[in-house]
Amino acid sequence: MVLGLLLAKLGVKVLVCEHHPDFEREYRGEVLMPRFTQMFRQIGLFNHLEKYPHLKLTELEGYFEDKRILNISFSEIVPEAPFAIWMPQPILLQALLDQAKQYPNFELWFGARVESLIEEGTVTKGAVIHKGKEIFEVRANITVGTDGRFSTIRKRGDFELEFEDHTFDLIWFTIPKPASYDNHVRFFFSKASNYIILPKHPNSIQCGLVVPKDGYLRYLKQGIGSIRKVLLASHPLFHEFAKELKDFSHFSLLQAKIEYIKKWAKDGVILIGDSAHTCSPAGAIGVSVAVASAIVAADVIEDCVRKKDYSEQALSRVQEMRKAEVRHILNRQKAFSRILLPTSPWLRGLAPFLFSLLAKSGLFRILQRDLMVMKKPLPVSPEVGFTNL
């Protein structure tokens, strides 16, 4: 949606295909870290976005059992953007669509699924789209795969995976938010489990239980009592929810898989976002990293359209401009994963004390800023953004 909006603003004819019938469904990545605020300010869309319903999260806390071992205000990490934003993705996507509707060269198809790519030799010329009961052959100079970690475009285009890392997963569930609960992000180490608690707009709390890769399958095999036992041994907020559990319908799984595609572009087709570089949930920056690639891609693609050069070499400029930061972030996430879910019991016992040491020394603030903040503006033309919103 970000790429489609920016290209439409630049005068490029755009068709965005959305598999689902609307935006209303459950999403996992709805936290927009300060780097998202920075880039939306850069392209002039932040004031527009801020008019829509959201929560601002102001502090990050870490606990070992019931003892707080870390407390950091976002203002300490990022004075220029002293908050993270919880904005439900249906609201975020609608805000982008509301802006895009002013451009006659922008079109959005709901319920549109890519069946295959249209290929002439080694060049992609569009895609075959299944929409409702009809099948359309949509020809395009450039086809962009923005369809996430299970990308159809990636699969149909035979893009090669360079590396992946998958050590843990998150089991997500939502509980009512107590009236007195503040807008702080909290993560917990405990003997029973490690987990994170996030205020969720408008009046819920989203919780993520950290489990080893395939750990959710073990709970499924052992039955609902197995996960109920863990939740009852964890935060008091979970107890009422746990006691009323009858089945696993209240849970969903987020694979914390890191992936990096070797080459993001081929002649006439390019991958961006999770299709090209899948982030883990560590640091809650996946949306922000994906959107940064979309903004850079808008600038590159507009130049390709103007020059009528849709080659792999021309489109690969997106990867050239983004790869250093993306690789750095993925490497940081891999290291963080080893701390979040250590492989040995003695390391699990050491993790909270390591976090406490990092917090007291100030290193945690440095590490968090490294993930949460853009060190410099995105290298795009001012024409990509908006000026009077």
Image (cartoon, rainbow, N blue to C red):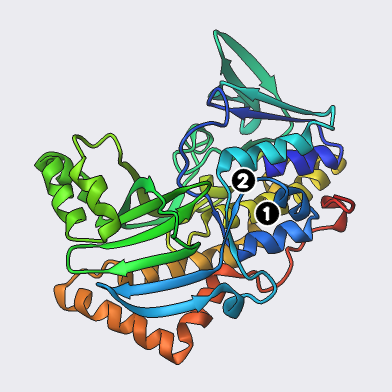
Q: Position of residue 177 (x, y in %)?
A: 41, 51
In the depicted view, which residue is nearer to us: 323 or 166?
166
Residue 247 visible, this angle: yes
**What number of labels is visible?**
2
- Residue at (30, 38) in percent of width and height: 250
Of all residues, the one furthest to the bottom in this rendering is 361
Residue 355 falls in image quadrant: bottom left
Residue 210 falls in image quadrant: bottom left
Nearer the camera: disc 1 or disc 2: 1
Residue 318, label in figure: 1
- How far is the residue under mark 1 from the one under mark 2? 9 Å
- Residue at (48, 47) in percent of width and height: 203
- Residue at (23, 52) in percent of width and height: 239
Placement of 282 over or under 208, stated as above or below: below
Residue 214 visible, this angle: no
Q: Quadrant of the N terminus?
A: top right
Residue 377 falls in image quadrant: bottom right
Tell me the amino acid under the disc marked 1.
Val
Q: Are marks 1 and 2 in contact (CB under 8 Å)?
A: yes
In the depicted view, which residue is nearer to us: 140 or 169?
169
Q: Which residue is mark 2?
A: 265
Q: Is residue 253 left or right of residue 10?
A: left
Of all residues, the one furthest to the top in this rendering is 133
Q: Is residue 275 left or right of residue 318?
A: left
Q: Position of residue 206 (x, y in %)?
A: 40, 51
Q: Which of the two discs, 1 and 2, labels the residue nearer the N terminus? A: 2
- Residue at (26, 59) in percent of width and height: 236
